[in-house]
Every structure is written in structure tokens, then in C-alpha cells.
Image: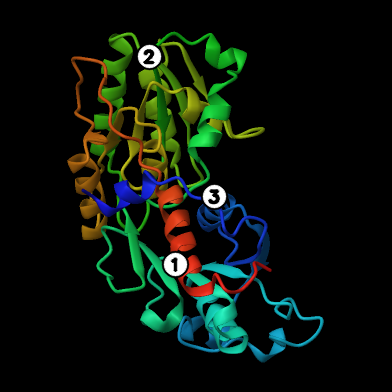
Amino acid sequence: MRTETSIASRTIDRPLAGARCWIISEAKAGMDTQTRGLAEALGVDFEMKRVTLAGVKKWTAPWGRVPKSVAFGDPGSDFSPPWPAIAIATGRASIPYVKELRRRAGPGVFTVVLLDPQTGPNTADLIWVPEHDRRRGSNVFTTPTSPHGFSPERIASLRASIPPLIAALPHPRIAVLLGGKNGSYHFSDADDRRLQAALKSLATLGASFMITPSRRTHPRLVEITEAATRNAPRILWDGTGDNPYPDFFAHADAFVVTADSVNMTGECCATGRPVHVFHPTGGKRKFHRFHAMLEELHATRRLPETLDRLPAWSYPPIDATGLIAREIERRWLKRCAWLPPK
């Protein structure tokens, strides 16, 4: 039996609920999604600590030291006592800070780093990496997908009420989550045409659509998605107002997501509902390992160019955030239970 399954099946108290937590990260939306989701799953009282590095410090991160101008530990500094019970860090710029915190605060602060810090196992008490990452060790914990803000409780809450525009869409409702070009995936003209053909075939089968682009979505990808779904019932977010992604996510019967977005793919797999992944040209080995693993778990399937049936399969939802939170609690109880949460 998988370790993650046995952990998920336990019912335990939240030993860190209400404890003080520092989230140390760069100001990036993807990082915020991961760290906030994990902090909420732990029930901690968290404070965001935004960090940036410039000049030589930027290029030497994560191996360098905290800039002297930060006055780490001095009264009035953003990084001064009282120290938190737990710190969660992510991003290259955060690593010098979490190492300095460990040096000054000692074992009374439990430290967590999300993603491989590249600075060795002694960087934090717990290092989380996705299973497709190569790092392993006694203080390394892995899950198939990344932490995020869609806990089972939040999904249930979102599903408890449905916006009228979504309620008006006929079933099956397909959420189309568009990423875009990055350093790994190229999205050629031929790729875009393949996605267009697949969406057209879903429309022919009677699907309705809830479509949202991201900051990386190139204009042509939006254009071909619009053209493919033009004659079907749909909602296509144009980027104005609040992003309806949470409601799309909660009320979708199935998903189409582009392979470049590991985070969105993982979030979809928290629903237990069918996830078709569109693979454009390119992709590094780590992306291929990630998607192959989710296919092995029967959570996702590759999006074919033409579908002759609507997606209909299920699997146990993958609650990566909850799994990571329970592992942190287990290790904290083992190491720090003699200390009252701060």
C-alpha cells in the first residue's frame, strides 16, 4: 500500500493549529498558491515574508547569505524574534533566509522547504518535492502533485452553490484550462490546430465549456479555442474582473488542461474527475515523468486529436496538500512536541 494512502486514511488532531508561521517566498503567484494552501491545511496563523535578492546576492542564491541590509534578528526587522513555530519557504531567494533562521532560532522552529533547494539535506527539517523530482532522503517527502489551495473542504464548499451562468450550461461541463509557451513547451501552429480539433469534437458530442486562459496564454491559443467552441454553450473568461477559475474548477464534469501547467494539472486531480492533458511540442524529462505518473494513477489521459466519446472515468482524488500537512504534523510531533506552539 502506498505510504501516502495510509497517511491520508488517519484521523488526527491538528497539533499546529493556531501556531505562528512565517511564509518566506518570492512574490510569485504559483508559490503563493502552494504555500498558502499548505498553511491553511495546517491551520497555522501565517505571515507572508516577501523576499527578493539583487546583484551578487541574486546570482549566488540559494548558496549566499541574507543581505546585511535586512538586519536579520535585529529588533524592528521583518525577521526578528519572537520566532515562529514553523516556517515554510519556497524559491531560490528564500533559501538564505530559512538557513539563517535555522542558525539563529535553533530546533524550536520547524522549517519546511517546498521544492529542491539545491543546497543539501540540512537546509530544512522537511523538504517536499514532487515524485517526479530526483531528490530523495530521510527528510524528503514526495507526493504525485504539488500543494495548492483546493482542499476537500474548499471543493465541497464551492460545489454547495453554483453561479447562475454556470448552472445554465448543460452537462457535461468541460473546464478548459489554458497555459501557454514556456521554456519547455513550444505550442507550434500544428499544436494549436490539434487542440482546436479536439475541442471541436467535444462540442460535437454535446459538451459545454468553461474556458480560462492564464498569464502565459498566447493570443493564437485563445483564438483557436474560441473558434472551436463558438457554436457550443460556453463561458470564456476575457481577463476582466475576478477569474472564475475556482467556480469552473468546482463545477466541471471533466477537464482539458495544457501539459505545461503542472500546478493546474495537479489541482484538477484533486477532484477525482476526468482530466485530459493536451501535450504540445516539447517538454523536459521532468514534465514527462510527472504526466506519466498521473496516467499510471488513472487520473489523467492524453487528449487525442479527435474524441468519439465524452470523458467518463474516476479515481481517488489526490489531496497532495493534505498529505504534506499530515507529514509535517507527524514530524513536528516527533521532534518538537515538547515545545508549546508559538
Q: Nearer the viewer, mark 1 or mark 2?
A: 1
Going 54% across and 12% down the picture, which residue do you hit? 167
* Residue 145 point in image, percent of width and height: 35, 50
Query: Residue 41 has which mark?
Result: 3
Image side of residue 75 versus residue 116, left or right: right
Give the Cα distance between marks 1 and 2. 43 Å
For disc 2, the marked residue is: 172
Query: Residue 331 has which mark?
Result: 1
- 216 or 85: nearer the eye? 85
Snapshot quadrant of residue 188: top left
Give the Cα distance between marks 2 and 3. 31 Å
Considering only vertical position in the picture, is 219 above or below 167? below
Image side of residue 329 versus residue 157, left or right: left
* Residue 18 point in image, percent of width and height: 67, 57
Nearer-N-terminus badge (1/2): 2
Snapshot quadrant of residue 120: bottom left
